[in-house]
Amino acid sequence: MSLKKVTSRTNFIQNAGILFSLPLFESFSNDLSAPSESHFAKRLFVMSNPLGMVPNAFHPKTSGKNYEIPELLTPFSDLKNDISLFSHLDHGLRGGHEMTHAFLSGVQQKEARSMPNGNITLDQHISNKWAGQTRYSHLCTKAGRSRTGGFSSPALSWTKESVNVPPIDQSRTLFKQLFIADSKEHLKFKQQSFKRHGSILDAIHRQAKHIETKLNQSDKQHFDQYLTSVRQIEKKLQLEESWLNSEKPQTTLKEPTGESLFHSLDDFFELLFWAFKTDLTRIATLEIPGDVSGSDFQLKQGYHTYSHHGQSDENLSGIKVYELFQMTALAKFIRKLKAEPDPSTQSNMLDSTLVLFGSGLGNASAHTNTNLPVLLSGGKFKHGSHHMFDETQKTPLSNLWLSLLHKCGINEPNFGRSTGTLRGFEV
């Protein structure tokens, strides 16, 4: 994929003839290893849909520990002390479906150039810091292919260069990537690819020395940014190449065959659980498509159609089927993590994994981006409460993202549009 997002930062780079194409590699730095301290999280999982949740069926009516489990969260009744819920957090954005892509960044794509870290998302930022620790620095997945596009794709994960990371949208493809060894022909192709890209980067470095002597101070600053991106790509290539001949773990899992959300969601959760358990990755995202057909659910209409419920009893009943289906699968995943020992922490995998659910849309029927649905589990946070914030104070959701960064051992002063860590939520 062409790195136009990187090279378009300055026209003189294109004029110098060093515009180049490479496969998609997100920027990263390997200056901080994944934390080993027991109070830090070791893994991050994020699940998101593009249509939000029915607000009064997701957000509890009261705050604190004694809240009553709302209708859509009944699958978590036995996990109440393992989850935290949040109300009246958002990014201060307006635009309905067009803003859902900012869920994990707090920044619109069109604003990215004006922000120090662009619209990089929480998962990608952590992935950059933990790069090289596992075979896959992150796994971006999606439970089924979208038939239309647009609103149906949450566009969940974004790099610093404002490139959307395309998800793996078939469970069988994920299975093969995780557990099936590459053929000799494919390995040879990859080795040749790494060698070819290394030669391209060497040529860029040679040209850069010549170009740099002809730039004024302002252009040198832009050029330094460009060279930083090149160096990051170079490091990424070196790390990926180091895993090339490493054997993949053995599994008794059968190759999945389902493609629709109804038939594949549990498969994706099972595969991602094993990806965490075998340490193939420590970061994974799972998108839920928005144009799911009603046929598998014995419903007359699709997911998106029901989301425009207009408070109709029939439509509300339909949309809740889709939303309960998602929550049931997520609760099952959390139970698996809780039941699985983590030898490196002498606890269970849930304690060392941050599990986050949410959406960039608060109320699909009204197309609002306020009061976003957010659920968090794991990571040894003090769970069991509903944190209801003052909606007049407009607490940024990015404050929670900053708290999660700190929980991952990444002690940075801000993220996105944060104004600090999330007050009242213990890290």
Image (tube, grey):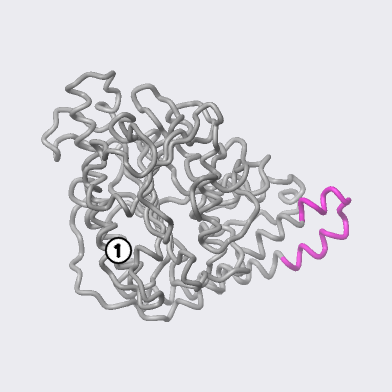
Q: Residue at x 43, y 36 (%)?
A: 388
Q: Residue 4 placed where, x, y %?
A: 61, 48
* Residue 156 sits inside the magenta stretch: no
* Residue 220 sits inside the magenta stretch: yes
Q: Residue at x 21, y 24 (%)?
A: 315
- Give the residue type at disc 1: Leu
Q: Quadrant of residue 66?
A: top left
Q: Quadrant of residue 62?
A: top left
Q: Residue at x 45, y 77 (%)?
A: 244
Q: Is residue 210 left or right of residue 110?
A: right
- Magenta highlight: main SS: helix
Work out whether residue 357 or residue 150 is closer to the camera in this orientation and state it.
Answer: 357
Q: Which residues are magenta?
A: 205-223
Q: Is residue 72 left or right of residue 353?
A: left
Above or below, 243 against 393 in this view is below
Res 358 visible: no
Q: Residue 153 placed where, x, y %?
A: 38, 40
Q: Residue 72 placed where, x, y %?
A: 25, 38
Work out whether residue 62 or residue 249 is closer to the camera in this orientation and state it.
Answer: 62
Q: Quadrant of residue 347?
A: bottom left
* Residue that carries the numbered disc 1 in the rendered image: 337
Q: Is residue 409 left or right of residue 145?
A: right
Work out whether residue 34 or residue 11 is closer to the camera in this orientation and state it.
Answer: 34
Work out whether residue 9 or residue 262 is closer to the camera in this orientation and state it.
Answer: 262
Q: What element does badge 1 sit on?
A: helix
Above or below, 8 against 257 in this view is above
Q: Residue at x 86, y 53 (%)?
A: 215
Q: Residue 81 placed where, x, y %?
A: 32, 53
Q: Residue furthest front?
A: 66
